[in-house]
Amino acid sequence: MVKYIKKITEKTTNLKLETKLLLSLICINIFFASVCFFGGMEIVLSKYDRLLYQSMQTSSALVSHEFYSRIEELITLSNIVRADTTVQSILDQVDNPGTGYGANYYSELYVTLQQHYLEYRHGYLKFAAVSCPRFVAYTYGYIKDRPSPERLETLIGIAEEAEGSAVWVTDYTGEDYLYLVREIKKIENLKLNNLGTFIAAVDMDMLVEEVSQVSREYEGSCWILYYQDNLVYASPELTGDTLQQIQEEIKTYGIVTVNGKKYFAIRGTMEDKEWGDYIHLVSYEEVSNSKKDTLRTYLLILFIALILSSLILHVVVRRVTKHIDLLVMKMRAFGKDSENPVPSPYDYSARSDEIGMLHRQFDSMAEQIRTLVVENYRQQLLTKDAQLKTLESQMNPHFLYNTLDTVNWRAKAIGEEQISLIAESLGHFLRMTLNKKSENFSLREEIAIIWCYMTIQQQRFDNRLQFAMNVPECCQDAMIPKLSIQPLLENAVHYALEQITDDCQISLVCSKQGKILEIYVKNSGSEFEENLLEKLRSHEIREKGLGIALLNIQERIQLLFGETYGLSFYNEEDFAVVKMEIPYIPVKGEDTDAKDDYS
């Protein structure tokens, strides 16, 4: 057996991924179809009563909600009648001992009551009445439906005990009607003295039959209703002994036998807790038919699902594996030629699944490899150039400093202040630029370098160069890459003064916007091309010393602070503007002596 399994494993290992997936999914599909068929049959047959309970619960909830709505309508009718100004006026005048009784009072009260009664007219509402000490006004209907004088007196007494609240009287539902009684109190000036009583009679058989039409899913239903734990209504098929049996046996749902006939019964609760529970019974013959229909429907759906899943299985597998095949093709093509990107018929940039991630990661990796190859070649060229420049500048800096100091003092001795200033500024400039300190370099130190450089340039160009600098003290402790601003000023001098003969204005402005430090270098007399950095990178503009310096500053800023920071170039009102944006990070233990070099 082990050898047989091992042999199958060896044969399937080298199959194409599409074939493996297809075989695996077919086996899984067959297995789960079998489990669903036999297990589902068992669940349907053994757990159907629970499903039936849930179905009947929904149907019963609809009926009970409709019943509760009809009950609420009657309470609303009582509110409207007792608040009606005509009813209030007539009952108040009838109740006033100083007012003579007139037949028109009864007529007006009857007409008003009849109007409201017709608005809520249903077959189960047998009559509505307003009783006062002198008379009782009934709506149109049969005299036989009216309560006897003794029962009327009892209903009025129950309403008076409730002090204006609506009361359902259930004592007579078996032989007569369900009564709604409510005391009518005087609203004017909130006196609330008793003016009369509103009475409404409800035929429970007709009410239950009408609300049952809301859900016709189960025919031949029987109902048992309770109000404050008292029996209010039971369908005629249910007798006294049977009612007691049902009430004791049915706690949630179950099957009961009534007069030799089986019923499926469930217990529920009305929306108004005062009404209590209800029990809904359905003939089990209907349930059996519904059970068979459900079983047939289940089998049909399962069979159709099995056929459809088998038909689309190959299509689904192919839709997945074709992207894997394309990735393999791209890998093989990249292995043969890593310089040229492999064209793809699909755009994977918007896909967030694993396939999209695989393709994007491979494309990114291939692009990085191509970039590294180019950058490595370029780095080798820059390294060679740096080595040449290092050899050219290998001279003793102390000899240079001493020479400049000598020139400075000799110039002062003969009264040449300009030569002295140039020599002194150049000496400071060389000391700071040749200093090997590059970490924790502050804006204050960079400004010291700038001050020396611009002093030399102002002496060189005399009155043609106008330089202004506005750097608040709160910004000068910010950390910046060393020699990141001076090349920008050098670029401005080169293109604005060396290339033309007009005067030039150059300014350096710094501001702090929250946690961002913004540095602007502006000059007149020149302008920047659009997308300057991109053109320098793509060699659309031939790189010279200053062009390489701009790219170098951009790369140093992004390496130090992140790709969201760096340089931007634009033109504004005859000025070429370079904007440097970096995060404000104060330098700890900053050397403040640099300020003395240019103050």
Image (spheres, grey):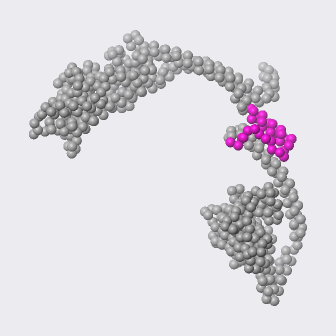
- Magenta extent: 321-350
Residue 497 position (above or below residue 115): below
51 within the magenta span: no
Indicate whether residue 344 is drawn in magenta: yes
On the picture, is 514 further left or further right than 279?
right
Residue 191 location (% of width, % of height) = 20, 43
Q: Quadrant of residue 392?
A: bottom right
Judging depth in this view, the residue of 118 and 399 nearest the camera is: 118
Which quadrant of the figure contains the N terminus? top right
Q: Picture quarter containing residue 56?
A: top left
- 423, 454: nearer the viewer: 454
36 vs 487: above or below: above
Residue 430 appears left or right of 164: right
Q: Residue at x 55, y 17 (%)?
A: 295
Examine the rendering and report whether any part of residue 395 can be seen: yes
Q: Nearer the viewer, residue 89 or 484?
A: 89
